Image (tube, rainbow, N blue to C red):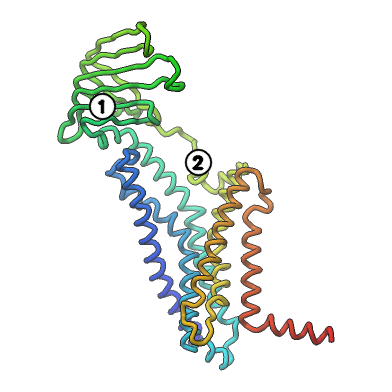
Amino acid sequence: MLIRRYLLREIATTFIAVIAIILLIAISNKFVRLIAQAAAGNIAPGVLFQVILFQIPELLAFLLPVGLFLAVLLCYSRFFADNEIPVMLACGVSWQRLLMVSLSLGLVVMLLSGTLTCYFGPKIAYQRERLLHEEGPLLLMQTVTPGRFHAFQKDKLVFYVTDINSDRSEMKQVFIAEQPKGSISDKQSWSVLTAKVGKVIINENNGLTYFKLLKGRRYNGTPGEADYSILSFDEYERLLEGTSMPQGLFFHRTMPTPMLLKNPSPSNLAELQWRIAVPLSAPLLALLAVPLSRVRPRQGRFGQLFTAVIFCIIYYNLLTISKRWVASGKLAPEIGLWWVHALLLGLAIFWIAKASGRLNQGYQWLRRSRA
């Protein structure tokens, strides 16, 4: 019991430290990418921290199994390097007890990660997408720089303003060019708007976002031809497309888990298996970390770290590839991502048998039986 508490305490302490470090690295990486998107005008600067907060549960669900794998590996490697585990084994502590300590922590992490991936993850992802969808139209006022051309709505609209007030509520001397639906090279009617004042407003009745222009003109015509029309207006409102989130429309990451079960399409099954595969990796990686942590005398506690990280990278890459194959129909859902787990389990059993000496005992028994 004392040995079990000692191992659990050391692994748990290392696990918390590892999770804090890799989570900080992952958040920093995400934050740099979001800053680049905000600079390009794809995300409103005011919602950067909210988007980061919404991504923490998704990152945490993926990093929990990895963190446990590294924690078990680092702790047991230190125990081997300091001859603590060899002394335990010499005093009668079996490999099974070491494996059970690691596996018990793996099951706890599996439950935590499964709760995030199957329940909280889809809800938080939906709120994140809704936030980005609602804030998208307001990017027009938050990211426009006077004296520069800006493209919005997948380059369908090109904006140019000469000035904007301090609270960014009104634009002055607005120029808008709307591209045709087809190719730019096709001879189709273009729409050009000019106005003295422009602002973004939200309709209180339907919740849609409009771009409101005051005291301007609208030019419609085909480039290279003389058939164009000019319309003067005192007030003009144009709907910004994609400003209302369709009801009942879910993406795979935002779809609740029961909905995935009710709609067993290849893409939905791929997402469902991924939500199960990430938590299931926790006990499997925890088992694999025990034999990989065994280091030779004078080898150092980090002797097997590089090999273990390579195994982990290959494992998750195989899961990602299998998910794409299931979603595209190249791999049957019955095989799905399960073959990757079976491969890792077989590899873990092989390394456990080798590290504990059972593999050598079986080989010697086989030789004697043949003799």
- Give the answer, above or below, for where 47 lies relative to 343: above
Name the residue: 66% across, 58% down. Answer: 339
Tally the marks: 2
Q: Residue furthest left?
A: 166
Quarter holding the C terminus is bottom right
- Give the answer, above or below, for where 361 lies relative to 33: below
Amino acid at the residue labelled 2: Phe
Query: In the rendered image, which residue does mark 1 sit on?
Result: 160
Amino acid at the residue labelled 1: Tyr
Name the residue: 42% across, 74% down. Answer: 14
Q: Position of residue 94 (x, y in %)?
A: 60, 86
Label drawn at residue 251: 2
Graded by Cα atoms within 10 Å as few (under 14), some (14 to 19) or many (20 or more), the crowding at tag 2 reads: few
| Mark toward the start of the polypeptide (2 vs 1) | 1
- Nearer the observer, 302 or 264: 302
* SS for dot 2: loop
